[in-house]
Image (cartoon, rainbow, N blue to C red):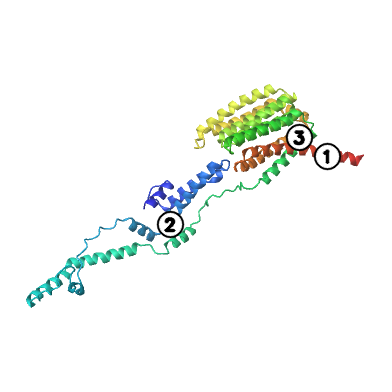
Amino acid sequence: MADINRCYEILEIEPGASLEEIKRAYRDLAFVWHPDRFAHNDRLQQKAQQRLTEINQAYQELVLFVTQPELKSIDQQFQQQPPPPPDKPLRRRSGKSAARPALGRSQTRPKAASPKHQTKSNSKSKKRLTTPNRQAWLGKKQSRRSAVREARPSPNYPNFTSNRKKEFPTQYSPARLSQNYSRFPWGPLTIAVASYALTGWILTVSAAPLWMWSLICGADWLWAAILLAEGSATPRVWLAALVLAGAVGGSIAGFQAGGTVTGAAWALVGALLGAIASSAAESRAVAGVVAAAFVLTVVGLMAGTGSGHWVKALVAAVCWGIVGLTCGLVAELGVNSGGPVGLCGAIGLGMGAWAGVLAGAGSGALAGALAIAGSKTVYGAWAAIGIIAGVVARMVAGERSIATGRGLYTFILLVATSSFGLWLGHWLIKSFDLFIQGISG
């Protein structure tokens, strides 16, 4: 019974719970402790795997315990204390042993007993053998033997238990690590090289300044150093990777679209979106960040291209955002839907900010800003996509490589991957230009 009580404790339910309560508790705990939720942290993933294994075993034992009353009664009989053993009766000597002379005694034959004395002795012996206490003791002994024989599990009990376990398929099977850290991460590294080659191609075509190349390499080296210092792919390492990728990609895309001011605004937008993507942020936080990102994108584009009054657009976005926030909070208090507190207010803030910045900027100013940006906006967007994709692919490769304990090797591998990808994109576009010139010449 102690093992069954332990199973109830593992599933965090009270003893005697119904089968539906057991299943409900199992589904909740399996969702909370499933290792796929900790894919970015090897230590937590192993801990979750062990915890899920205990939950699976406890669930199977409880289902078997609840659905098999005969096994339940057997377990209860095992837990009962055995009755105290009765006093050992005097052992009756057989005829041969009684007639055998004792050691150390005289070998003289005893006197023959008189018939009267012999009859009295036999009657006493017969009375002692047929006493009710003797019969009662024999009956109790036999009943205890039968009870123990019935309570003893059959030899097929382990096989029966294993077969029963197969009849209860669980929703979450015991965790298996999907990553195979013993192999070289060819797939993620190939995607990373291709992504950085695309970025190098675009930077070469658009005649990007040298500081863009240096910014990409510096951010990649900084992130690889953070991974090496942390020792594992923790959530902080993922946060740093996506924030750096968003900031670098946004700065390059913004500079291509509208110059330095637009690049700075879009770098802030990329960093905010990267922070949201790498954390389990609440819905109202996501709504607020998206609203701020949209405002910064439009205002930064107008300020960089000099089209329209970006200050007027920013002021209108703030004013309309306050109005939308107020309306959202009022609607939330009126409806009282029981959702997350502040979600309606955040949605109202976003809608108001979007409407305000579009009204303040004007459709003509936005069209003029996009016309000034021209094709460089497309180049910048593809460069940002290549950087973000390359960082994510390198993150996966670095996570698998550093899990084997090769820290410095992982740092060199990641730095070489980004540098080689950028060089490959630059070399491909130069080779393509030489090939076109050779054909035309």
Among the 4 quarters of the image, the one containing residue 381: top right
Q: Amino acid at mark 1?
A: Ser
Q: Residues within 10 Å of mark 2 (few under 14, many from 20)?
A: some
Among the 4 quarters of the image, the one containing residue 111: bottom left
Residue at mark 3 to residue at mark 2: CA–CA distance: 63 Å
- Near-viewer residue (162 or 28): 162
Element carrying mark 2: helix
Element carrying mark 1: helix
Residue at mark 3 to residue at mark 1: CA–CA distance: 20 Å
Q: Residue furthest right?
A: 441
Looking at the rendered image, the disc whose residue lies closer to the viewer, 3 or 1, is 1
Whether pointer 3 and pointer 1 mark residues with C-beta atoms closer than 8 Å, the reply is no
Q: Amino acid at mark 2?
A: Leu
Residue at mark 2 to residue at mark 1: CA–CA distance: 70 Å
Q: Which mark is residue 431?
A: 1
Residue placed at 41% from the left, 58% from the top? 67
Q: Earlier in the sequence, mark 2 or mark 1?
A: 2
Read off the residue under disc 2.
64
Looking at the rendered image, the disc whose residue lies closer to the viewer, 3 or 2, is 2
Element carrying mark 3: helix
Residue 202 visible in the current orientation: yes
In this rendering, the answer to whether 187 lies above or below 223 is: below
